[in-house]
Each structure stands twice: as structure tokens, then as C-alpha cells.
Image (tube, helix red, strand yellow):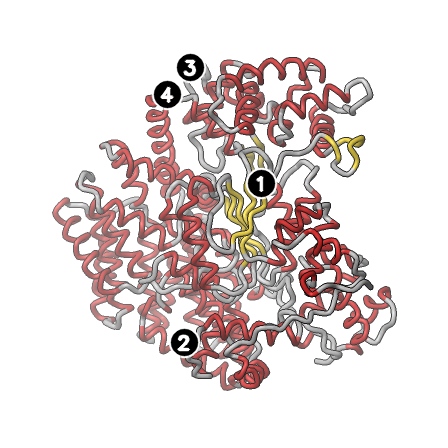
Amino acid sequence: MPACNREDTVNADEWREIVELRQSGESISGIATRLKISRNTVRRALEFEAPPQDHRPRSGSSADALRPRIAAALDADPDVTVAQLHRELEWSGSRNTLASAVRRIKEERSPRTSGTHTSSTRMSSATDIPLFSTSFVGRTEELHRIRVLLGDSRLVTVTGPGGIGKTRLAAEAATAYRRAFADGIRFVELASLRSETLLPQTILDVLGFDERDAPERSATESLLESLRDKHLLLVLDNCEHLVSACAELVALILRNTEHVKILVTSREVLSIPDEHVHVLEPLSTTDHRDPDMPGAAIELFENRASAALSGFSITDSSRDAVRRVCTQLDGMPLAIELACARLTALSVDDLAERLDDRLALLTTGNRGGPSRHRSLHATVEWSYDLCTTQEQVLWARLSIFSEGFDLAMAESICAGAPVDAASILDTITGLIGKSVLQRTTGEGHVRFKMLETIRHFGASKLSDNEKAELRVAHLRWCAELVRTARRSWTGAEQESASNRLRENRANLRSALQTALTDQNHETLHLASGLVATWFLWSSAFSVREHRMWVTEFLALSDLAEDVVPQLYATLGVLQTMQGDRVEAVRTLDTAAHGARELGDDATLAFALQTQGLNTYLGGDFEAGEHNLSEALALYERLPGITDLMWTAHIEMGMLCSSNGESDRAAEHFEFVHTQASAAGEKWMLSYAVYGLGLVALMRGRHDEAITLAIDALALKRAFDDTVGATLVTDLLAWAEAAAGSGERAAVLLGAASSMWDSFGMQLYGSQHWVQRREVYESRARTSLGDTVYSASHRRGSTLSMAELIAYALDEEFSDSPVPSSSYPAVGLSPREWDIAQCVADGLTNKEIADRLVLSVRTVEGHVAHVLRKLGVPRRHQVAAALANPSSRRA
């Protein structure tokens, strides 16, 4: 090994990065520039066969004196938080300094040993990572570079012009490296979001685990709290139109978390500290390692062309024309894909010739724009010109939709000369064939989506009057969607209606924003009626977001008189669910007063009902029963308000159960159960089943209570009803504790507590409900002991809704936690357990490194430890060792 001058010395970590960069194809000059060292230092480092010894002094930490006490605390509770240590150790210094000391101690022991889960523990089964029907071509080196950056940095921004493949690269990286993050990957698509204030809520919507917050906190505070102790990768896709808001929020996340990493795609960098930018360049037409070999652009062209034209392959006679096309398109992936779609009508030579002329013309006409934007715009413009008149018109009109639409939506909103409703299907088919629209399937039917570049281009072809007319038509359709859902809410179509609301959440948001922006009589009337629909929090929005929209509309001065009491009544029920009892009293009084003045008995009954619920939860059972009884009497005289009448019966049953009147409670729950079952309804049925489980628990029939609670939770799967699922989870936990299943009770109590925090106060902020829970909580804690109870409770708090339901139903789910007892007796750490499983699956060290976002040398060290701990000399023996029961201890 050659000697090193002191000025040329690099430490082991720097040496590994230099080697990895070189292996990825980076030049010596590029490495030196990136790492801010001399080229000579890079050359000398590359002469080493192994990491050089690092002789440079390491800086100490003011928290190092606490190392023994920190280590002891970690021994007692591996999941102890930095905040707890800060208090228990009475540390007067910076929390970040303490966090760094804790992290170093954990890393010295074993990477990420602070929990008892494998790296796939908290991965949600649905991470919202986009799926693509085409193969991933031409970005292998970039994918490797993203891995290196994510290994070294907490914030990586992939930037470049529209259509260059930022989203595809981010999706591939998220898929490839998902196992490296204990809490998984969350992919947040922001392209259709137009309101900066909804940015935190949008991210909360996508997170696989539930947000943690008290009702008085903002969505930003709730987001920070929910991420605080998580080990996950958050992908924020298409941030350029919200760059300031994204930069501010990302900076907050980085300051308030230790283990969250963020991958951003944006046409504009965030420009905040610690941001590592990866500029995504166009695909090359030649291989930079061998100029005689075709580059990634040629490979992509052949791949996409063969998809468009069966049997297509590049020949000696067509190779120059293909290279010419790719060169003219600046290697832009979207441009290449759009061009390949035309091969059904053109030869490659025809394509090259027409593209030459068209691009030259459009580039000349747009000299002020960036060169790559000119090329992409020219390609999209050319593709637009090749469409029929009907396709062009429909392309522009379809830009009104956010995050997708279906055929019926297009026919309803976008029909009109020269594209009548009957021709919409054929026109959409043509746009799919030209790669203007993407076809997706979900919830049993087909939907369509535009790439944002395509959507914005289409919108640019609309006049101001056309845009205004389409916005109103879109809002009108959204309002009708909600009205239809209300009409279907007590029948067999309820689940379908809920799915429609959920998949059109972005369209609903866009429509409401239109009304708030335009503020004319028609749009305000449509939107305020939409927002006043009381159950939107169960399917379209979260409780917090629904409350935000209602509050924003109530702040307007031009609302129709008849809708104001409805909005106040809806706001009152949202405040009641969040435990905001004092505000709810004022809100519901206003709703009731307004409804009486207007003679609106339906809204009056709703306000009285919610007053009864709010009062009962506050401890005044007599007043609560009086209001609920008055509401039920009104509902009996009013046709067509079955949904709210059923909820009033459920609430009266809950009141009776709190009074110890189990027979009366059962009557109310049975009433709803019978009617909902006969109608084929599921949502209120789940509450009725829950209520009967509550009655069974009161009567001491614990097994029956468990069965009914599980049945109710299974019914909740069809809806985004966090409130109801949380209530049922608490009941199941109580019944499990009463039946003697302490560990399951603790896990479920942890899950319920976490979910209550996601939208409001624990158990609606009701003291008598909290006291009831404490009885069962005490039983579980006593049976388990404080340490085991706390660990089980923490485990429950990390479960996503899907994982919780699977756990409650005793179902297998792929990302279920691996309990500490299932690690081999020889003491594999969670990271070693992951690597052992990879070895057992036959992966090479390089494949393991790619999958877990680790360097190959790190994997080699872990593999050596795994072999030693398992007591086997060869890799192929690992699978048998893991499968051998004798290698484990309970």
C-alpha cells in the first residue's frame, strides 16, 4: 500500500465515498469538485486497496461524559426517546448534541438497535409509490447515485426540467431502497396541490401511519410530531410550484427529526442548508464509457418503440435516424416516449425528418426559454398538432381534473362542440394511443391521468372564458358527487359512494378552492352545500381538513342564508369529535338558533343531536339525553334523514351504556343493526356492532365483546373512518384486558391512543370515558408489568390502520413486526437479521447493499458477523440456520 502525505490523507469514510463515486463512473475531477478535495488526493486514495487508517483527531462531544448513563438507559429501554433522556439525565446542553451522542452509542453497538423490529416493520402495504407499466431504462447510474446520496444525506433533491424523468427515478429509488427504512417509504404527489396551506395536511393524508397531534395544534405541528421518532424516507414529488412552502416545511422536518430522510423532485431546488442536489441530465445518445456503443436515449427509444410497434428493433439502416431523433429531442425521456407513439403512422426516417422541421420552427419562436424546455415544448406542441381537432379540444378540457378522472366525469364536464358526449370515449382512446393520457385501474373501474407537463400544456390552450366555464362545471359535478353520496349513504351503494369520494379527493379540493377564489353566487352555493355534508370526514377529508374547509366558508360574507346553520351544525360535530367542547357549545347554539329562525327542522334536529352528544360526553347525562330525545322525536317526523337518525340512536345507546342501562343501550344498537342490515349499509352497521360489543362488555361477556369489536373493525376497512376505527379499537383493547390478554390489550391501547391524537383529544376529551379506559389499562399493566406493557403499547402506537386491523383480526401481513423473541438466540441485531434474510434469499453483497442502501464493505462486515453468530462457515448454510428452531430461544 502506498504511503500518503499528510495533506493527501483521507479517512475511511471519505475513501469509501471516493471509491463508490469512481465505480459509478464519476471522473476524478468530478469527485474532487464534489468532495472539495484535490484531484491528487483522489488519485492517491484510489491506489489504496482498503480504507486507510484515519490519523486525524476526532472532535469530542460535551455529552460524552454522559455515555455510561445513556448506555444504561438504553439497556433498560432500547426505545427510550431523546426527549425522555433530556429530562431524566437533566441535560442542560443542546438536545441535538444529546441526540448525536445517543446515535453514536447505538451505531457502535449495532446499526439501528433501538427497536425490536426488522427494517420492514412499519412499512404500509400501500406506500403510494407510482407504478409504471414500462420498464426502467437508462438511469441505472443515477439510481446508484441516489443511493449513495441517501446513505450520506438526509435531504436529496432531484432536479431538472419537466419530462426528464424525475418522478420515475424517485419512484424506482423508493421501490429499490424501501427495506432500508424501518418505517417504510411514503410517496407524496404534489403536482395537483395548489394551496400552500394544505401542504402539511396532504403529507399527513399519504403517511402510512396516523398523524399524532392534539386538536389545538396545526397540521404542521401534528406532522412534525408524527415524524419525530420515525425511520422513513419521505418522497415529495413535483414541488416546483410550492417551492417556498416545501422548503420551509422540509427545513422544519429536518430540524425536528433525527432519522427521517427526504427525497424531493422539483424543477427548482429548495435552496436550504443540508440540501444535496442531483441534477438529472438528459439521456445520452452514446455510452460515455464507449462512444461506439449506443447510449441510454437509444435504449429508451428502442424499448418504447417496440411497445408502440410490435416487433420493432433498431437496424443498421435505422440507427442513424434514431440517433438523430434522440439528439433533436435532447435525450428527454418524455419527448422520446411521445415521439415513439407516432411510429404507428410514421417510419423512423419520416419521424426524424418531420421532427427536424418542427423543432427548428418552434425553437426559433421561443428563444427566451431554456433550451431543454424549448425542446420539450416543441415535442408536446408537435404531438398536439398531430392530434385531431376533437383530441386537441378534449386534451385542453381534461386539464381541469386534478389527479385523474373517469369516463363518466369526462362525458359530464368536458362534452360540447366539437366533442359531444358520444365521441368522448373514442377521443380518449386516441389520446391514450398518443401517450397524452395514462390509463390506470383501481376500485374496479378505469381512470385516466395526465402527466403534469401534458396537463399544463392543455390548460394553456384554454381561453379565460373557457377556463371559467370548466371550473364551474367541475365544481357542479363535485357538488353532485357529494349529493349522490348523501342519497346513497344508508343503502347498499354506500361503499361505492365512499370510494368515489376518496379517489376524487384532489378534485374536491380543487373545486372548493375555485369557489373560494371566484366567490360568485353560484360557486359559493354549490361549494358551501358540499362542505356542509356532515360525513365527509369519513371518506373525503380528515376531521381536521373538513373543519378547515367549513371554517373558511363560514368566514365569507356572501353565503346563502339557508346554508349557514347547516355549516355551523357540521362544524359543531367536528369540534365535538375533536373534544373542543366549549367551542362546540357556542357553535351548536348558533346552528340551532339559525335553524329555528329559518324553520329548518332537519338542521335543528342535527344541532340538537350534537348538543346532546357534546353535553353527554362532558358528563351531564340528563341534559344530553334530553337533547338526543328531542332530536329523535324530530327525526321521526322528517322523511329522508335516516343517516342522522341512526347516528342519534347510536349516541343514545352510548349514553345509556355509560349510565349502566345495558338493556336500553342494546335496544338502540339493535334498532340500527336491524335497519342497516336490511338496507345493505355497512358504515352505521359497524357502529351498531360496536355498540352491541360495548353492551356485551358491560354484561361481563368478554369473548362476545371481542368477537363483536373485531367484526366492527373489519367493517371499517371499507371507509377512511379514523374516528370510528379508533373507538372500536379502544373497545377491543378493553375486552382483551378483561379477558386476560394483557399483551394484545396493551398493543391495541397504544394504537388507539395514537389514533385519537391524530384528530383530537383522547376519547373525545370525555373524562368519564377516559376513566373507563384507565380501569382496563390498569388490568393490562398489572398482568404484564410496566416494562412489557410500555414496550407493547409503543409497538401499537406505530401501527398503520391496515396493520392494526390485520393485527386485530389475527391476519398475516407482510410488514408485521418481528417480536424480539424471534431473533436468533445468538443475538442478531435487527440490521443483521435483515442481512441474514437477504443472504438466505441468495442475494450477493452488492445486491444486499443496493437493497438496504448500504455500502458493499458495510454489508461484508455484517455478513461476517452473521456467519459467526449463527455458527456456520458458508453463506448457503444461513437459510437452514435461520429455519432451525434450535437456534432460537423464546
Distance of label 3 from label 2 (alpha carbons): 63 Å
Q: Are marks 1 and 3 in contact (CB under 8 Å)?
A: no
Task: Using the numbered discs, state the Cα–Cα distance from disc 1 to disc 3 in whole angstroms.
Answer: 37 Å
Q: Residue at x 47, y 65 (%)?
A: 228
**Residue 417 got which mark?**
3
- Mark number for residue 166? 1
Residue 804 appears in the rendering: no
Check disc 4 and report the residue beneath it.
Answer: 463
Q: Badge 2 is on which residue?
A: 773
Nearer to us in this view, 747 or 775: 747
| Sequence-wise first label, 1 or 3 | 1
Q: Secondary structure at mark 1?
A: helix
Query: In front here: 219 or 407?
Result: 219
Q: Tell me where residue 718 appears, x and y as whole percent.
A: 50, 51
* Between 830 and 294, the one nearer to me in the picture: 294
Q: Residues within 10 Å of mark 3 (few under 14, many from 20)?
A: few
Rendered-image quadrant of the C terminus: bottom right
What crowding class fits label 2: few (fewer than 14 Cα within 10 Å), some (14-19), or many (20 or more)? some
Say which amino acid is labelled 1. Answer: Lys
- First of labels 4, 2 by sequence position: 4
Asked if residue 664 lies left or right of residue 595, the reply is right
Kindly identify the residue that appears in the image at 75 percent across and 57 percent down.
Answer: 44
Mark 4 in CB contact with mark 3 (< 8 angstroms): no
**Disc 3 marks which amino acid?**
Ala
Asked if labels 1 and 4 touch by Cβ distance under 8 angstroms, the answer is no
Q: Amino acid at mark 2?
A: Arg
**Picture quarter containing residue 278?**
top right
Q: Is residue 126 visible?
A: yes
Q: Earlier in the sequence, mark 4 or mark 3?
A: 3
Q: CA distance from mark 4 to mark 1?
A: 30 Å
